Image (cartoon, helix red, strand yellow):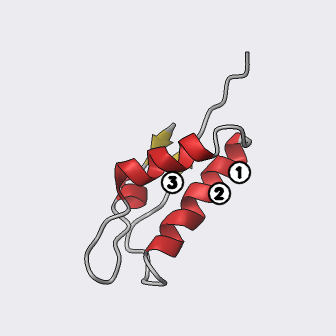
Amino acid sequence: MFLTDGVTESTTPDGHQFGTQRVLDYVRTHHGDTASDIANGIYYAARTFVQGDPQDDDITSVIIRADR
């Protein structure tokens, strides 16, 4: 997984950041999803977290899954 800081630094109106831990928690919870669904889910989770505040930075993620 590769992310830009626009994901982790998505900030609520009162100054809290989405952070790395929320990203990792999301991935752990959705580890069985497709890579595309995980990437989209991280995006929507970060956008929901900021409660509609405008996004000042890019949100980019690359998820690579390797199934055994």
Percent coordinates x, y for residue 67 in the rendering: 73, 22
Helix, strand or loop status at disc 1? helix
Percent coordinates x, y for residue 62 in the rendering: 56, 42
Helix, strand or loop status at disc 3? loop
Q: Residue 37 shows which numbered tag?
A: 1
Is 26 drawn above or below residue 47 in the view shown? Answer: above
Sooner in the amino-acid sequence: mark 3 or mark 1: 1
Percent coordinates x, y for residue 47 in the rendering: 51, 71
Tell me how far mark 1 sits from mark 2, CA to CA: 5 Å
List the residue tagged with mark 3.
60
In this orientation, which residue lies closer to the viewer: 50 or 58?
50
In this orientation, which residue lies closer to the viewer: 62 or 24?
24
Give the crowd class for mark 2: few <14, some 14-19, many >=20 residues within 10 Å: some
Q: Residue 25 shows which numbered tag?
A: none
List the residue tagged with mark 2.
40
Residue drawn at point x = 49 percent, y = 84 percent:
52
